[in-house]
Amino acid sequence: MSRADVLVDADWAEAHFDDPKIVFVEVDEDVSAYDGGHLPGAVRLDWTKELQQPAVRDVIDKDDFGKLLSSKGIGNDDTVVLYGGNNNWFAAYAYWYFKLYGHDSVKLLDGGRKKWELDGRDLVKDDPSRPTTTYTAKDPDLAIRAFRDEVVASIGSKNLVDVRSPDEFSGKIKAPAHLPQEQSQRAGHVPTAINIPWSKAAADDGTFRGDDELTSLYGEQGFDDAKSTIAYCRIGERSSHTWFVLHELLGKTDVKNYDGSWVEYGSLIGVPVEKNV
Amino acid sequence: MCGAPDQDTLPALEVGAGEAVVHGFVVQDDAPLGGAYVRLLGESGDFTAEVQSSATGYFRFYAAAGDWTLRTLYRGGSVDTAVTAVQGQAVEAEVEVPG
């Protein structure tokens, strides 16, 4: 797999708007962003309502994922191009989600909404029209998903990559600084984790840095290629961004995303926590 | 949730005793600039958070006390603005970008 297989730029996107086998999908936490304008023909996935179970904190099951994609007009043999705001955090989460359920051809739009807007490219408000499909999801690929017990067991043995900001890692703040800091869970990080913020893998405009730069970044921060890897953040979407970098762009093997992340780990009874402040 | 909240629909500002808020407006040619991307960078230049300014140009961060840089991206470039956050207070910063 190469970068060109998983990442497209805006010019590529504009040249493929009329291709019926390519589906552009916008994923934002702020779903109103889509209503304000989106890529021509793009469908919307609502992260909070459609990609999370309403009662249990978990991904939806494979049958519901199949129904969801069917309702969006996405077929098993379509190429899905994901993009969104927040530097593609939720688009990367959706990318990981599509791979979890075995979708073959998935790509990210480099830079997402931000670069698209900063470049002054066109957005439309038309509702897309795609006929429903009969999508069949595969069993979840647990080779790319980590759970809490595996994280605890991996302390001191695997690459535990904490991709939050340095102040969240140290325990100085409990959530990203654009959010109120009222969370009740403990602050800090998983012992032996290395802090490589997701943001170091991207330029200011949200595009991913080049492969050589990325390889140097992780190597300099103590990433050990001989070890398996688990990436985590606060709720699993920033770590999806890093999972995409490590597994899809750099081709590293045995990389998992811990989508329970700090909101889960930092609230567990009795697990070790390290804090630097 | 973890992503940046819509700055058009923020709740009224309340600053907790342990919080240090940095907020303000982005303006261009004396008019509010909505849709700009405001990034909060730590003392070593590390990215901490990013929001998109509201229709009135407003942005808000819950930082920690200390020195920060606001890097504002807009069509045509970016500008950096220094700001010092104070615990228990809301410090206002005006970001003016070239027209």
Image: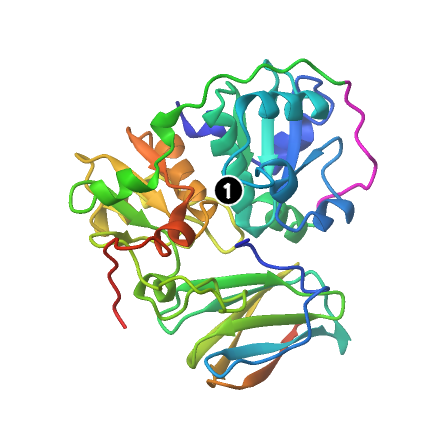
The answer to whether residue A23 is above or below residue A190 is above
Q: Quadrant of residue B94?
A: bottom right
Q: Measuring from the top left, give residue A260's x and y in whole percent.
A: 41, 44
Chain letter of mark 1 equals A
Residue displayed at 16% across by 46% down: A156
Residue displayed at 54% across by 18% down: A137
Residue displayed at 52% across by 54% down: B2
In what element is the residue under mark 1? loop
Q: Which residues are magenta?
A: A121-131
Residue displayed at 50% across by 81% down: B83
Query: What residue type is disc 1 on?
Result: Arg
Q: Is residue B13 left or right of residue A183?
A: right
Quarter that holds the N terminus of chain A: top left
Q: Measuring from the top left, give residue A213's x and y in whole percent.
A: 33, 45
Q: Is residue A97 left or right of residue A114?
A: left
The reply to whether residue A8 is in sight is no
Q: Is residue B88 magenta?
A: no
Q: Measuring from the top left, give residue A269's x and y in whole percent.
A: 31, 55
The reply to whether residue A274 is in sight is yes
Pointer 1 residue: A57
Q: Residue furthest right?
A: A126
The answer to whether residue A237 is above or below residue A25 is below
